[in-house]
Image: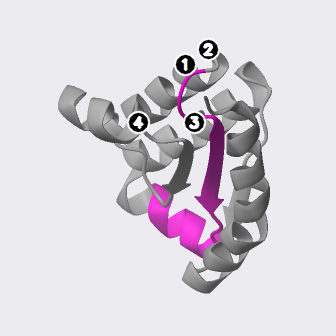
Amino acid sequence: QEDFNKALVYESEIFICLIGEDVGKFTKEEFDEAYARFKAKEKPFVMTVFFKEFTNEEIGEQATNNLEGWTRRVALQKYIQNDLQQFYGSFKNPDDIINQIDKTIAEDISIVKSVAP
C-alpha cells in the first residue's frame, strides 16, 4: 500500500475519491494520506470526495448485508463534514458522476496551474 500511495497519491495533482457502500482500510488510508498532503500544500493540490447516493430501501439493504462497511462509510462522511469541516459531493450513477467531474475539472485544472511549481 505504501508503494501505491507513493506512486498515485503522492504524485497526483488532483485526487478524486469515489465512495460506494463501503470504505475499506486502504481507501481510508489513501484518503488520509491525500488529505494530510493537501492540507500541507503538497500534492494533491485539489481534492474532491463523492459519495454514492442510495434510496432508503438500498440503505436498509446495505446496513443489513454489510453493517460494518456501511458504518465505516457513514463514519467517513461525518469525519469529513464535522471534524475536517469540509464539503463532499454525491452522485446517483456513473453518468451523474461523469457529468459532475466534467463540470468541475476545468476549475480544478486552473487551481492546479495556479499552485503547481
Apparent side of residue 6 relative to residue 79 in the rendered image (left or right): left
Whether the magenta-drawn stretch holds residue 45 is answered as: yes
The mark closer to the camera, 1 or 3, is 1
Q: Nearer the viewer, mark 2 or mark 4?
A: 4
Name the residue carrying label 3. Answer: 76
Q: Is residue 50 above or below residue 73?
A: below
Task: Indicate whether residue 48 is drawn in magenta.
Answer: yes
**Residue drawn 52% across the image and 57% down it:** 18
Counting from the top left corner in percent of width and height, residue 58 is at 56, 73
Question: Which kind of residue does numbered mark 4 sit on?
Answer: Glu
The residue at the point 66 percent across, 40 percent down is: 46
Secondary structure beneath label 3: helix
Counting residues from the start of the chain, the first of labels 2 and 4 encountered is 4
Q: CA distance from mark 2 to mark 3?
A: 20 Å
Q: Secondary structure at mark 2?
A: loop
Label 1 – label 3 distance at C-alpha: 15 Å
The amino acid pointed to by label 1 is: Ala
Residue that badge 4 annotates: 11
Point out the stretch of residues depicted in magenta. 42-63
Q: Is residue 85 visible?
A: yes
- Foreground mark, 1 or 4? 4
Label 4: few (<14), some or many (≥20) within 10 Å? few
In this view, the mark in front (2 or 3): 2
Sequence-wise first label, 1 or 4 = 4
Q: Which mark is residue 36?
A: 1
Which residue carries the number 2 mark?
A: 40
- Residue depth check, mark 2 versus mark 1: number of the one nearer the observer: 2
Identity of the residue drawn at 49% across and 61% down: 20
Whether residues under marks 2 and 1 lie with C-beta atoms below 8 angstroms apart, the answer is yes
